[in-house]
Amino acid sequence: MSLTFDALLLDLSGVLYDDNKVIDGAIDCVREARHLGLQLRFVTNTATRSHHRILQQLLGMGFSIESRELYTAPRAAAKYLEQHNLSPLALVHPSIASEFSHLTKTQPNCVVLGDARDGLTYEALNQAFRLCHQGLPLIGIGLNRYFNGSNGLMLDAGGFITGLAWAAQVEPIIMGKPSVKFYQHIVASTGLNAKQCLMVGDEVAADV
């Protein structure tokens, strides 16, 4: 088989599994990609599970994956904060709070906003608004509009990030798909150029 790419970037939900059930042929696809010598990267905006938990979930489903191949939006956000010496007010899900705990100081100088579910109270959002209104950076973990929950469609963090940015008149810095910086970091990890990498997602606006 003649391929025009050397690395395969795979979204998780909707591509490898759906509602925690493996999509037919997904495991075989990953296995065949490795057999063909392709580099693999697993890419997700999931902001309600830690890097370790996502890795264990994929392994438990039967996928062949190494930790270094998994790229999550929360971890990308944490790395961005480290690089820019930022200490966040982190409105994130409790399961990923540990990704930012070592960066949190008494006085925040930025806001990180993700899918915090019930943590996105008026009080919390207003605190974030006041900081951003002073000109502090707003870092969003993904910009997804919604996701499929067990009981139907669920509002994701994108609407909250967009609304907060509009109210505070700031431009959000998005970590995760489809951020160019996020993909540049992933492509760089392969040692290839972007034209040698193929991204597979289930939603053009959110993934590409």
Image (cartoon, helix red, strand yellow):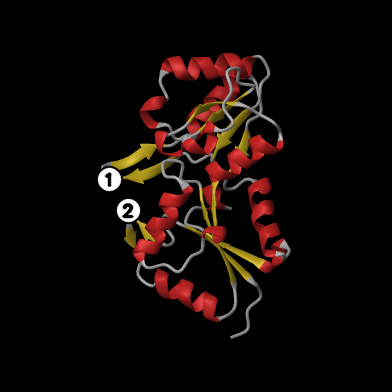
Residue lying at 70% horizontally and 58% vertically, measured from the top left: 188
Residue lying at 40% horizontally and 60% vertically, measured from the top left: 58
The span from disc 2 to disc 1 (Cα, nearest Å) is: 7 Å
Count the numbered circles shown. Answer: 2
Residue lying at 44% horizontally and 14% vertically, measured from the top left: 123
Task: Work out which residue is located at the far bottom of the displayed protein and give it.
Answer: 1
Q: Which mark is residue 150?
A: 1
Q: Nearer the viewer, residue 146 or 29?
A: 29
Give the quarter of the image for residue 117.
top left
Give the quarter of the image for residue 55.
bottom left
What residue type is disc 1 on? Answer: Ser
What secondary structure is marked by label 1?
loop
Q: Nearer the viewer, residue 166 or 172?
A: 172
What secondary structure is marked by label 2?
loop
Residue 192 percent coordinates (x, y): 72, 66
Q: Nearer the viewer, residue 13 or 112?
A: 112
Residue 23 percent coordinates (x, y): 36, 65
Q: Nearer the viewer, residue 79 or 149?
A: 79
Of callouts 2 and 1, the N-terminal one: 2
130 sits to left or right of 189:
left
Residue lying at 67% horizontally and 48% vertically, measured from the top left: 180
From the image, tell me which residue sits under label 2.
19
Q: Is residue 40 above or below residue 36?
A: above
110 sits to left or right of 99:
right
Residue 118 percent coordinates (x, y): 36, 27
Residue 184 percent coordinates (x, y): 69, 53
Q: Is residue 130 above or below residue 85?
A: above
| Tag 2 near tag 1, CB within 8 Å | yes
Q: Residues within 10 Å of mark 1 (few under 14, many from 20)?
A: few
